[in-house]
Amino acid sequence: MAQNMFLRMHNVSKTFPGVKALKNIDLEVEYGEIHALIGENGAGKSTLIKILSGVYQPDEGAEIIIDGVVQKTITPLDSLKRGIAVIYQDFSLFPNLSVAENIAMVSRVEKRKKIVNWRETNQIARSALAKLGLKIPLSKTLSELSVAKQQLVAIARALVNDAKLIVMDEPTSALSRGEVESLFSIIRNLKEQGISILFISHKLDELFAISDRFSILRDGKYVGTFGEDELDDDRLISLMVGRKIEYKIFEKRTLVDPIFEVRNLSKAGNFKDISFTLHRGEILGITGLVGAGRSELAQAIFGLNPSDSGELILEGKRLQVNAPEQAVQHGISYIPENRLTEGLILKKTMSDNICLTVLKQISSRHGLIEKEAQNKLVEKWIEEMHIRPNIPNMIASKLSGGNQQRVVLSKWLATDPKVLIVDEPTNGIDIGAKADIHQLLRDLSEQGMSIIVISSELPEILAIGDRVLVMRRGKIAAILDGKNLTQEEIMKEAL
Amino acid sequence: MNKDIQKNTKQIGAPQKENRMRRLVKKVHLDTKELVLLQLLIGVFLLMSILSPGRFLSVYNLQSMAYQFPEFGIFALAMMVIVVTGGINLSITYSATLSSILGAVVLVALNNLGVQPLVTVVIGVLVIIISSIACGAVNGLIVAHIGITPMLATLGTMTLFEGIALNITKGGAISGFPDMFQWFGNSAILGIPVPLLIFVLVIIATYFILQRSSFGAKVYMIGCNPTATRFSGVNVKKVLFLLYIYSGILTGFAGIIMASRYNSAKESYGYTYLLQSVAAAVLGGTDISGGFGKVFGTVVSVLILQVISSGLNIFGVNRFITDVIMGMILIVVLTINFVNNRMEEKALLSKKVVTA
């Protein structure tokens, strides 16, 4: 058995400041096997792949054996040399270079060639494409090719590098059905040549169509590896979702006083025909797979990504929202998913960050900031949100994830919004801090604020959502009552 | 655990002297970088005074310096406010000369028509200011609304302004202003040169707009992270647009002073100030990638550069050698700042490990 394994990862853990992303993961891939790696968003798949490709170093105690050789450490170059090729969603190709150059690039760099040898470049590219049974004009600029063809170029490049294991991260997400079929036949062809494939995807039907075995991750933990015959859709979903950290489940309310209405909102390529009503004091959960259009919808409501058609109605009045400052004026706030790049200005102080949304409040008539008003406001929010350390001049980047999120919440609560949209409010925050944020959102809703919580984490949605809106491929799949709702019911709508 | 506590207490018990020094610095709101700059200014001033006692400290030299550096200082501030946003304004000197040329055309025309000098000068100055606002608005439109990188946008407008100016002057200088116009560049009130007074006003205005107003707070935030600032409901385009207009107005002031001092207008006046302005802003602690920078630091840097160039001039050092020396000083100071930042970051990182 052990001899059949191209890759053995044992006891792999990875700790980031404040978060344990992976806990004792095992993963074994046989020669010539198509192996599916699955798990929800944030289960640790990408982290594991980054360890395999040498981008991250695992915590101590990990055992990694590639092709029979024990790897003490893996650098990106080691990973490549040992035959591991990762094809990321963006392919990491050079769009401005020709097909041939893209395919031959790695070998060119590796041989430290200073002068371009076109004959050799073309030869390398031609033989790689021949191995795949493909015909793509070598001299074409990459950006002129379709996404599907670009992906094949990325695979060809992996072959040039003598890849023995090709990792594909969501390879079918941008492909049409026909293109998926031809990709699969190429993958099967590679398998026959003894090349292993590690396949990451959310689309269960596709996974079942091609995979030999499945390894499942959940919350950074290893659930198990199963053969194709041991699983069906329902079993797979329940293994993926599992019994997770128990959040406090808040009692679900039925609220009747409508405050905010979205009518037939559409944006080409993002979402279509979205209609729902938010009630006063309600928490509406919005979930769905990554790419289902959740964040795009939220950003449309907030004016960052104005919709093509449809209406927003707040307290009976039709709103005109084409820019964030208009949304803020109407009393709509949006806390983005990406705290570090969109929510906070990391290099500036806690005080600067909290005040950014309410500069008018703390300024005199002439537009000068009144230091005293500023300090008072900041102190109030530090106190109210229990931000630690309670130093207003602390640079935001030095705060912990939970405290950073509290700063972002403060900055938006200071605007006293009527509708608060929070996108992945507990992403990358440790469990204790997550529970605090759930409690806070609940308290705010009880004070009459209407809240939309977007989250991929189903237990979170189940814990605080009075109702749950499930999106699938840009459309509303269902609006479910939060009472007695289960993860399985949501997953069925989302997939 | 115990070791950590020991380490922490050690840090708390830092030398008393340093603490007293820090408290003093805090009182006058200077950070370490600004203190270093101030010391540097005093240092070069003393050095020049000692090396050429009679001449550098002479009333004549000090006065001539006081007439020279205001235009440089105003350019430096016009540059600095844009660098704080993470951009750069390469068009400042040509925006100044184009505006003053347009003003000069009006001044000369009205003067020849025999209009009252006071009226002529007021109209001329207004034309210069309005032209400079227009130049700033063009930059603002291209950078903020169209979204072209500031360096490319202002490289374009720099050439554009120069071209328009040359078309008007045909390469020569325009002169023949009413004598009263010379007041801006060459006279003094209570012994204080008028250009210096204008510079002081510009310093105060820039300080309040950038460092004290809510508008300025937005400018710094945009410089750090325009995306997060937009996500915070700030109209980033509007802020940038207005700031480019402000930068333009400042070049208008510099244009007035230059036209008045030289008693003529020409497209190439002040073009050497362009790169010196970047140098002064950066030397003064403005982060070229945006988000940080203060009026005080920029002004002190302008003075430092002015003292050095005047001093070297008095020693009879060849101008080209002066350039070499200025370049070296800039590189040395920037290297020191860079190394300092690195060390601070490293210290922070190792601290984090201890507390974790």
Image (spheres, rainbow, N blue to C red):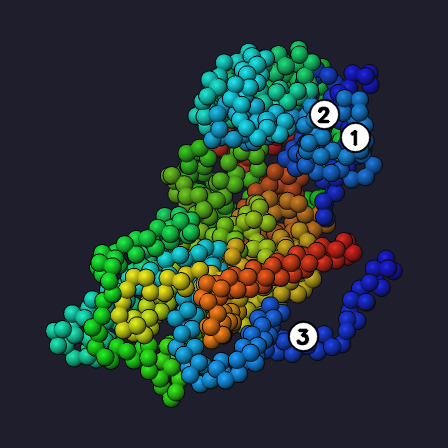
Q: Is residue B318 above or below residue A439?
A: below
Q: Which residue is mark 2?
A: A82
Query: Do the residues bearing badges 3 and 2 touch, measured as CB atoms within 8 Å?
Result: no
Q: Quadrant of residue A19?
A: top right
Spatial CA span between label 1 and label 3: 51 Å
Spatial CA span between label 2 and label 1: 10 Å
Query: Do the residues bearing badges 2 and 1 touch, measured as CB atoms within 8 Å?
Result: yes
Q: Is residue A400 above or below residue A37?
A: below
Q: Residue at x 49, y 52 (%)?
A: B226
Answer with left or right where residue B49 lies relative to residue B183: right
Q: Which residue is mark 1?
A: A71
Q: Residue at x 29, y 80 (%)?
A: B183
Amino acid under label 3?
A: Arg
Location of the C terminus of chain A (image quadrant): top right
Residue at the far left in the pictured view: B113
The local crowd at label 1, few if under 14, some if 14 to 19, many if 20 or more residues have their Cα within 10 Å, is some
The one of B237 and A464 positioned closer to us in this rendering: B237
Q: Which residue is mark 3?
A: B22
Q: Is residue A486 visible?
A: no
Q: Are discs 3 and 2 located on one and the same chain?
A: no
Q: Are discs 2 and 1 located on one and the same chain?
A: yes
Amino acid under label 1?
A: Gln
Secondary structure of the residue carrying numbered label 2 = loop
Q: Residue at x 78, y 56 (%)?
A: B354
